[in-house]
Image: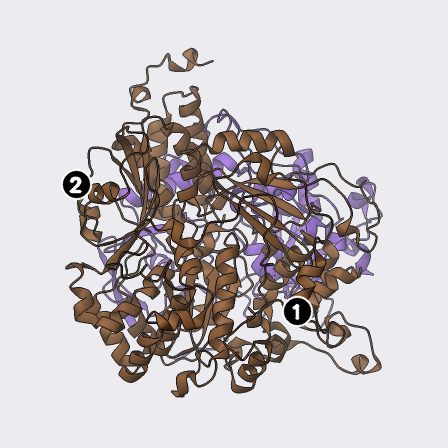
């Protein structure tokens, strides 16, 4: 391609950050020094463009190192990957965690979403604003405009931190939550939940704090020849020719190359992870994942049984607790046998749509096109949802094993694990788990001596709820903007890189392990016909013991809330939000329906992703609705009109209703806009953006006093 | 049938296509397989409004004004991209369809300046759309403010005014103006600039949600971007957000009058390709150049010479001089 690239070079630090991911530039065509040979050849075509899927990882590499992505750094990435600058700019501006404007290395994300708002996020927000000023990335005072960026300027002193109001961070059980990220040679993070303003606004460490610690762990041991990769999964990058040209990124030599990076003796010391294992000072140490599982240790648990019992960072411990028995059984059954078991088990997707997993796998497996792909959707971002985080932090090997089985069933050689950017601990645990599995031959070529080859690539999201949509996730992985695609064609025929792809949620995948261990029919006997197996619920809000709960399908909502200890304050629940922002409210006196797909449907609501967010009568419900509307406005990709503009009009009307400036036209307007969003939007985001608001109006009677608005109402408003 | 609309010319014929029976508003229609619902509607003369659909581009189905009801589907389907299937039952004027089309027109009309979009006034009347129902329009943003917005952040305001995408026009070169207050985000300019036609990739979609916008990298001015001034983006723009500087200036002066314009399709004289150019002439001056989309070779695309290189026909660069510029086009034109 004849692209016009920026001439200005990146700083050495920026270049090093990109080269650590991509390897050094091979020629002047991709940003290296010009040599005599470069004048006699031209790089382009498919080989140059096939690395487009590394755009988001490259943006992360710079953002992780510097804290933001400069024009020069973006320009260098574009050269390296043969990406048009205008397109790369479009991708970089799509994600909220990336910044193209200079900002301090430290960012504080304060969750102001519904679960945290129900537990004091508003005060936290005010206190943080007192210390760090107004939130957001609006232009700030800094170095004078046009000042030259001296080498190493990114480490110069500046404001302490920027902060932003964040959508749900998936820490609802410990609300209010905040996440602190700090760029550096080894990026660091700290999770504060419940958070206080003092601990998240603490003074930043000196530039590149504690370099000795991060260097001692083996970072950049060989910077001259080829910088050590920032994650073991990236090791084979420069060797691959790209997934779209028919050769999978995983082949024998690459697999062997990967093993060099990992310790051969049981994976200790831990392989290098993207984030430093030393958390930022300030917040109290993060509790272990089992603290989020009130039932931990209960022998009756199926999905959560290893959390708190097995060491999530040790493969041997996982195997000692029954790990990899399911994969062995799968290899005995053969791919079609696995699909048969999953179909017999009646497993349905746990991401919200409840599509039968066996049918999805069978449809993918029988497509003639190859390679086929598996995508694990770990972009858990539905407000109020944190079950996938707890699984990934507490039992990461189970997801690695389940993905291996799914890849085996559908005939995929590569599985992509797309994890949201707000989950640094889950990312570290999975990076470790994948490296250990590779070192033991449980991933890579010839898994367990079966002749089946499979490997997992982790892709980190960068702050976009929409990328959890099953086709937007493909675009995000491919290095495009995370916009949903039009369906049909469906992913099973035209998915990632245009190939047949099965996309499964984390919880769905880990259900495959008990299915193979106990057999499909035995699994199907758990729960009720039509909704089989155990189900995870994310209980938060004003309950005594918030956390992830596992119950067989069919338990009632009341039983679940009793298990969670009932109300925290002794007040009866006024409303329960099921399924998150895209779900719906039920009243506090409607708790006796069975939690099944059909039971929820009969009760006029949805289970969605398993969110159970409880509000007592102290919670300001109109404010919750405004927050939900703001969430959808922020997270709409902007592709289709009903969602792009409808979410704005919905928020405006709710702001008027809750602010006392209603004109009496709001409720019919909300209903009409909501119906158009539901009917005419491209994807599930727009189609469900009005669900929660509708149910709050119709079931809870929020704004009931404004419904029969008299014509005098506007005058009464201030 | 779409092929019936193309003119009689030596067009390469594809393989014979099977015919598919569908029901369109209760009427049996036979169309070739692989046709879209929009093709089927065109074949029987059912009018379907479209905005983001481009006859020379792959449908993006972003605007959703063409939605139709397909029996058995949970949501409405975009007619421009949904392929017909045997036995499909389609309704193009059901209450659900009318409701969504009305709301799409209202949502667009309330947030975008549609004053130069052909067809909108008539559609608003047909569907009873009232774009003013969301309250007074918010003040236009200063130039550059929308381009600086960060994904996932917004000022909620107090709900008293309806947010719009309006901002001053970007007028940074002598040949065409980008007035993004009129942009409905149909993606057609991006596709025409990118891999579907021009392969220049000067513009992309940046930002997210309501703040999504068409942008060069870092919002640089067009002369600093990769733009080659082929003007194929203007050719496909459905709203007049992209327009010739001549048209933009004449509209500002109030002298633009299409009823006094003639259109003459002729052959570009610059090189041997022989592209068709349609000269729009008002008062004996070329004011705009388009290209016929049904030309089997160029499909409406031109290069900078065919699109903008018409000054030599006229007396001198009077109009350009009036703007206080040299009148030679962008620097790179050479």
Look at the numbered discs 1 and 2 and tell me whether their residues touch, using CB distance below 8 Å: no
Q: Residue at x 27, y 40 (%)?
A: A565
How far across and how far down the image is residue A38, in percent? 79, 79
Q: Based on the displayed image, in which of its 4 quarters is residue A8 positioned? A: bottom right
* Chain represented in purple: B
Looking at the rendered structure, the secondary structure element under dot 2 is loop
Q: Is residue A369 above or below residue A271?
A: below
The mark found on residue A218 in the picture is 1
Q: Are marks 1 and 2 on the same chain?
A: yes
How far across and how far down the image is residue A397, in percent? 41, 68
Residue nearest the viewer, comparing B297 with A657: A657
How far across and how far down the image is residue A285, in percent? 52, 48
Q: Is residue A160 left or right of residue B102?
A: right
Looking at the rendered structure, the secondary structure element under dot 1 is loop
Q: Based on the displayed image, in which of its 4 quarters is residue A675 positioned? A: top left
What is the chain letter for disc 2? Answer: A
Q: Look at the image and tell me in which quarter the C terminus of chain B lies.
A: bottom right
How far across and how far down the image is residue A360, in percent? 30, 68
How many numbered marks appear?
Answer: 2
Would you say residue A573 is visible in this rendering?
yes
Q: Which label's residue is closer to the chain start, 1 or 2?
A: 1
Give the image's coloring scheme. Answer: by chain
Q: CA distance from mark 1 to mark 2?
A: 56 Å
Q: Is residue B157 left or right of residue A393?
A: right
Number of other residues with Cα within 10 Å of mark 1, as a class: few under 14, some 14 to 19, many 20 or more: few
Residue nearest the viewer, comparing B94 with A301: A301
Which mark is nearer the camera, 1 or 2? 1
The mark found on residue A484 in the picture is none
Provide the residue designation for mark 2: A592
* Chain represented in brown: A
Q: Is residue B224 above or below residue A234?
A: above
Q: Residue at x 27, y 45 (%)?
A: B94
């Amino acid at each position: 391609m004849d692209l016009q690239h920026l001439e200005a070079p990146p700083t050495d630090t920026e270049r090093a950050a990109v080269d650590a991911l991509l390897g050094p530039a091979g020629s002047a065509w991709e940003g290296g020094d010009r040599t005599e040979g470069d004048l006699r050849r031209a790089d382009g075509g498919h080989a140059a463009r096939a690395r487009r899927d590394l755009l988001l990882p490259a943006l992360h590499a710079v953002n992780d190192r510097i804290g933001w992505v400069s024009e020069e750094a973006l320009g260098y990435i574009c050269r390296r990957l043969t990406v048009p600058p205008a397109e790369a700019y479009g991708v970089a501006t799509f994600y909220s965690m990336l910044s193209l404007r200079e900002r301090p290395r430290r960012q504080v994300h304060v969750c102001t979403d519904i679960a945290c708002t129900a537990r004091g996020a508003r005060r936290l927000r005010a206190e943080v604003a007192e210390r760090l000023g107004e939130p957001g990335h609006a232009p700030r005072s800094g170095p004078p405009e046009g000042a030259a960026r001296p080498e190493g300027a990114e480490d110069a002193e500046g404001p302490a931190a920027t902060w932003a109001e964040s959508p749900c961070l998936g820490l609802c059980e410990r609300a209010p939550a905040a996440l602190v990220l700090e760029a550096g040679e080894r990026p660091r993070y700290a999770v504060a939940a419940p958070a206080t303003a003092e601990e998240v606004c603490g003074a930043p460490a000196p530039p590149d704090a504690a370099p000795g610690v991060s260097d001692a762990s083996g970072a950049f041991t060989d910077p001259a020849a080829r910088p050590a990769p920032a994650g073991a999964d990236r090791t084979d990058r420069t060797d691959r020719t790209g997934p779209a040209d028919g050769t999978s990124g995983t082949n024998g030599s690459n697999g062997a190359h990967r093993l060099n990076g990992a310790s051969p003796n049981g994976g200790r010391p831990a392989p290098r992870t993207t984030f430093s294992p030393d958390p930022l000072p300030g917040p109290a140490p993060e509790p272990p994942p089992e603290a989020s599982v009130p039932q931990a240790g209960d022998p009756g648990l199926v999905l959560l049984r290893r959390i708190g019992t097995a060491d999530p960072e040790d493969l041997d411990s996982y195997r000692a607790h029954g790990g990899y028995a399911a994969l062995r059984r799968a290899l005995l059954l053969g791919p079609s046998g696995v699909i048969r078991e999953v179909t017999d088990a009646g497993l349905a997707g746990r991401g919200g749509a409840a599509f039968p997993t066996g049918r999805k796998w069978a449809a993918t497996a029988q497509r003639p096109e190859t390679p086929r792909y598996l995508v694990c959707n770990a972009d858990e971002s539905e407000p109020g949802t944190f079950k996938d985080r707890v699984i990934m932090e507490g039992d990461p090997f189970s997801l690695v094993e389940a993905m291996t089985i799914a890849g085996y069933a559908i005939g995929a050689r590569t599985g992509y694990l797309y994890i949201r950017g707000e989950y640094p601990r889950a990312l570290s645990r999975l990076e470790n788990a994948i490296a250990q599995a590779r070192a033991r031959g449980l991933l890579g070529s010839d898994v367990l001596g079966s002749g089946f080859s499979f490997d997992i690539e982790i892709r980190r999201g960068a702050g976009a709820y929409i990328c959890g949509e099953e086709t937007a996730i493909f675009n995000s992985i491919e290095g495009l903007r995370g916009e949903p695609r039009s369906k049909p064609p469906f992913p099973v025929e035209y998915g990632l890189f245009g190939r047949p792809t099965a996309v499964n949620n984390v919880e769905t995948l880990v259900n495959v392990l008990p299915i193979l261990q106990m057999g499909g029919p035995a699994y199907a006997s758990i729960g009720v016909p039509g909704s089989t197996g155990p189900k995870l619920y994310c209980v938060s809000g004003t309950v005594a013991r918030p956390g992830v709960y596992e119950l067989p399908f069919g338990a009632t909502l009341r039983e679940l809330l009793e298990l969670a200890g009932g109300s925290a304050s002794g007040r009866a629940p006024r409303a329960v939000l099921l399924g998150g922002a895209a779900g719906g409210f039920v009243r506090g006196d409607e708790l006796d329906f069975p939690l099944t797909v059909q039971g929820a449907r009969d009760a006029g609501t949805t289970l969605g992703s398993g969110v159970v967010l409880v509000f007592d009568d102290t919670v300001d419900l109109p404010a919750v609705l405004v927050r939900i509307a703001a969430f959808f406005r922020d997270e709409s990709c902007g592709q289709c009109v009903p969602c792009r503009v409808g979410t704005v009009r919905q928020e405006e009307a709710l702001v008027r209703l809750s602010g006392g400036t209603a004109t009496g036209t709001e409720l019919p307007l909300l209903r009409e806009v909501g119906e158009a969003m539901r009917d005419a939007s491209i994807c599930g985001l727009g189609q469900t953006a009005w669900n929660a608001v509708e149910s709050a109006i119709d079931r809870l009677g929020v704004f009931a006093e404004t419904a029969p608005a008299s014509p005098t109402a506007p005058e009464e408003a201030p | 049938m779409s092929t019936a609309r193309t003119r009689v010319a030596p067009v390469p014929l594809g393989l014979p296509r099977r015919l598919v029976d569908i029901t369109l508003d209760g009427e049996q229609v036979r169309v070739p397989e692989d046709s879209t619902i929009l093709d089927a509607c065109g074949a029987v003369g059912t009018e379907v409004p479209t905005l983001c659909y481009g006859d020379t581009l792959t449908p993006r189905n972003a605007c959703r004004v063409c939605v139709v009801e397909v029996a058995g589907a949970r949501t409405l389907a975009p007619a421009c991209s949904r392929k017909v299937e045997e036995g499909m039952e389609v309704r193009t004027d059901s209450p659900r369809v009318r409701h969504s089309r009305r709301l799409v027109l209202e949502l667009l009309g309330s947030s975008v300046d549609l004053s130069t979009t052909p067809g909108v006034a008539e559609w608003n009347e047909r569907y009873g759309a009232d774009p003013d129902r969301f309250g007074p329009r918010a003040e236009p943003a200063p130039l550059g403010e929308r381009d600086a917005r960060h994904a996932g952040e917004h000022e909620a305001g107090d709900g008293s005014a309806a947010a719009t995408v309006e901002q001053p026009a970007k007028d940074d070169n002598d040949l065409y103006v980008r007035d993004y207050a009129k942009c409905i985000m149909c993606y057609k300019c991006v596709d025409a600039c990118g891999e579907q036609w021009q392969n220049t990739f000067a513009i992309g979609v940046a930002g997210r949600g309501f703040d999504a916008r068409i942008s060069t990298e870092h919002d640089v001015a067009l002369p600093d971007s990769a733009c080659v001034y082929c003007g194929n983006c203007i050719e496909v723009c459905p709203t007049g957000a992209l327009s010739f500087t001549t048209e933009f200036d004449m509209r500002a002066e109030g002298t633009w009058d299409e009823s006094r314009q003639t259109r003459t399709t002729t052959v570009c004289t610059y090189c041997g390709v022989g592209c068709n150019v349609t000269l729009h002439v008002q008062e004996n001056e070329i004011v705009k150049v388009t290209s016929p989309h049904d030309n089997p070779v160029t499909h409406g695309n031109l290069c900078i010479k065919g699109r903008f290189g018409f000054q030599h026909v006229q007396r001198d660069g009077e109009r350009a001089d009036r703007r206080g510029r040299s009148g030679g086009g962008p620097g790179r034109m050479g």
